[in-house]
Amino acid sequence: MAKQKTITLKRVVVTGLGAVTPLGNNVADTWKNLVNGVSGAGPITKFDASGFKTRFACEVKGFDPLQYFDAKEARRLDLFSQYSIAAADEAYKDAGLDNAEFNKNRAGVIWSSAVGGMSTMDEQLIDYAEHRGKPKFSPFLVPKIITDIAAGHISIRFGLHGVNFCPVSACASSTNAIADAFNYIRLGVADIIVAGGAEGAICESSVGGFSAMKALSERNDSPETASRPFDRDRDGFVMGEGAAGLILEEYEHAKARGAKIYAEVLGVGFGADAYHLTATHPEGLGAYLAMTGALEDAGLTVDDVDYINMHATSTPVGDDSEIKSIVKLFGETPKKLSVSATKSMTGHLLGAAGAIESLICVMAVKDDIIPPTINTVNVGDEIAKGIDLTLGKARKKTVNVAMSNTFGFGGHCAIAAFGKLRD
C-alpha cells in the first residue's frame, strides 16, 4: 500500500498589484479616486446608446493600447485582453518580477472573465448582418473572444510555464481565480501566480441584454449618482469595465528574493444559493456559507474582521439579501465591522469585480483606510441601519482583516480574506 503524502500548507502573500478601471489606468489613480469618493460613471461613448433605456456606464477613460502593444498586435486583441495585459504588466513590474530570477516552470497565470470578447462578437455579427451573403469573419475572431485567451496572452508575455487556466463563474469569476491561485500555491504546486480578471463588455448586446432583464439603472439624467447601494431609491447596477491583477506568491519565496509584501491571503470560502438563475437567495444563504467558509479556512472569527467590501451592486433584491447574510453572521449591530460598496464608484465590472475588489481590500489593509459608499442618501433596508456602511467619506481605521464578497448568476458565491502579515 502506497504511503500517504503529508502536505504542509504554505503561506501565500500579495507582492504586486495592477489595475485598469473607470477610476484610473493604474493602481495609484484608482485608489486615490476611490478614497476620494469619485464616480466613474458617464454617458456611453463606445457605441450609439441613444435608443437604449440605459445610456450610461462606468467606462475606462484614456486607455492607450499602444503603450503596451504595437498597432498590429492591438488589432488582434479584444479590449478585455488589452485591459488584462495592461493590469498584469503593472502587477508584474510592481512585484519586481521583471528584474527577478525565479523558476518560470513554477510560475503561472489564473485569469478570468465572465463573458470574454463580447465586444468583438458584437462587431463581427453586426458586420455579418450588414453584409449577409458575403461573410468576412476575422481569422482572429475565435482567439479574440474565448474567455481563457487573456490568461494565455499573459503567460506568453512573461514566459510563465506553470499552471494556466481561466475559471468562469459569472461575476464571481475573478475571486475564484484568486482562490484557485491561493490553493495552488499553498499546496506547493506553484511559487508565483498572476491572478485576476478583466471585462470589456460595454457593447450593444451586453447593455441591451442586462437592460432587458431590468438589471441596469435607468437614471440617465444623473449617471454619477445612479449606483446607490442600500438606498431606498436604487434601481439597478451600473455596468463597468476594466481589469485588476494580483501577484500571489509563496511567503518564503517572496521573503528570499526581498519582495515587498502588501498583505497575506488568509483564506477563501465558497457557497451556492441553489435558488434561482439570476436572483440571489432571499436570505443570502450562499453568501453566508461562503463567508463562514472563508473565516474557517483562515482560522478567524467574526470578531477578527475589520472590513468587508460588499458585492452590493445597487439592485433592490441583491443588496438586501447580502445585508441579511452579514447580519446573520455578524449580528445586527456589529461594533467592529465596517463595510462599503465600492461599485458605487467603479460600477459593476462583472467577471473582473472580484479582482478589483480584492485589490481594494489589499489596499485597505496596507493603508488602514476604508473606502466609502457614495450616493446612498436614504438607507432603504431597515436591517442595514445597524451596519457601518461607510457612507459618503472614507475613514481611517486599522484594518487587520478584510474580506471581499462576490456573487454571480447561477448562485455562485466566492469570498477571499486578506490581512496584515501574521507573525
Image: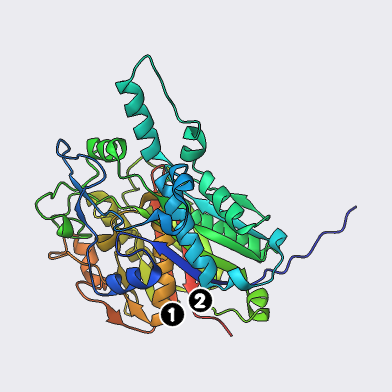
For the residue pair 107 and 250, the one nearer the viewer reads as 107
Residue 331, numbered circle: none
Query: Position of 1 compared to 156: left or right?
Result: right
- Quarter the C terminus occupies: bottom right
Residue 366, numbered circle: 1
Q: Quadrant of residue 47?
A: top left
Q: Quadrant of residue 185?
A: bottom right
Helix, strand or loop at mark 2: strand
Query: Position of 13 compared to 350: left or right?
Result: right
Tell me if I can see residue 68 in this picture.
Answer: yes
User: Colour mode?
Assistant: rainbow
Residue lying furthest front in this view? 71
Q: Residue at x 65, y 53 (%)?
A: 163
Name the kind of residue labelled 1 in the image: Lys
The percent position of residue 344, horizontal first and vertical second, equals: 25, 61
Residue lying furthest top in this view? 133
The residue beneath circle 2 is: 263
Disc 1 residue crowd, few under 14, some 14–19, many 20+, Cα 10 Å: some
Q: Quadrant of residue 160?
A: bottom right
The percent position of residue 208, horizontal first and vertical second, equals: 25, 36
Q: How many marks?
A: 2
- Contact check, label 1 and label 2, Cβ < 8 Å: yes
Helix, strand or loop at mark 1: helix
Name the kind of residue labelled 2 in the image: Ala
Q: Residue at x 23, y 39 (%)?
A: 211
Q: Earlier in the sequence, mark 1 or mark 2?
A: 2
The percent position of residue 368, horizontal first and vertical second, equals: 38, 82
Q: Gap in Å between the C-alphas at discs 1 and 2?
A: 7 Å
Tell me if I can see residue 333 in this picture.
Answer: no
On screen, 149 above or below 137? below
Query: Position of 385 compared to 365: left or right?
Result: left
